[in-house]
Image (cartoon, rainbow, N blue to C red):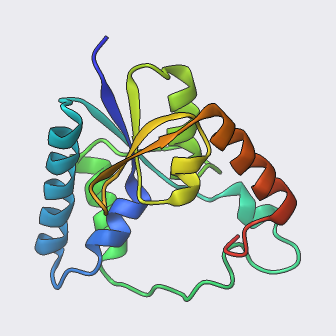
Amino acid sequence: MKKYLLIDGDSLAYLAMGSDTLEEGMAVIDNIIIDMLYANKCSKYHIYLSRNSFRKDISTIRAYKGNRPKLENILLPSLLKYIEVDHGGVSEYKLEADDLVVYFKTKDTENAIICSIDKDVLGQIAGTHYNYRKKEFVTTSEWDAVEFLWKQTLMGDSGD
């Protein structure tokens, strides 16, 4: 089987929403995907998007990601729809894109390459992943992934 990409589409849309127009944002998405395919020597990819995270349902002390500034952007919904329609973006009810890319990586650890800009995604499963903002590869060992799990368990994530 050939290598293929598992792309965190949420982060991709957030990067593109800094564009001045929808067309520019769509071009940013297209260009980043092309760059990822080229850098990883792949021709196939799967993009995942978040939909109604379960984490929002279980947040009782404060809103999930409530300490983050609210990103109001008129382009974001259209960019997410563009990823869904034109790039086959997939979502699963109550799951986040980062959870989905990690889940599908566990199903094919040899061929799937996670592409994300989120350090949490890149650090939670062993393998060589690609940070498409920095255009660099990140290798996470089995030990690093276990250590990351326990750090998150013990310390939590102030962003969450």
Choose top left, top right, bottom left or bottom right for residue 57: bottom right
Residue positioned 59% across, 46% down in the render: 99
- Position of residue 158 measured from the top left corner of the image (x, y, whole percent): 73, 75
- x%, y% of residue 115? 38, 46
Q: Which of the image's four quarters has the N terminus? A: top left
Which of the image's four quarters has the C terminus?
bottom right
Query: Which image quadrant for residue 18?
Result: bottom left
Q: Is residue 87 left or right of residue 143?
A: left
Left/right of residue 25 with respect to residue 142 in the rendered view: left
Q: Position of residue 114 (x, y in %)?
A: 42, 40
Residue for point 62% across, 45% down: 124
Q: Quadrant of residue 43?
A: top left
Q: Give the residue drawn at x 73%, y 46%.
A: 147
Question: Where residue 78 appears, x then y in whole percent?
Answer: 29, 69
Along the horizontal axis of the image, is 147 left or right of 76? right
- Outermost residue, top side: 1
In the picture provided, is 109 more to the left or to the right than 153?
left
Counting every numbered tag in the picture gives 0
Q: Residue at x 77, y 56 (%)?
A: 151
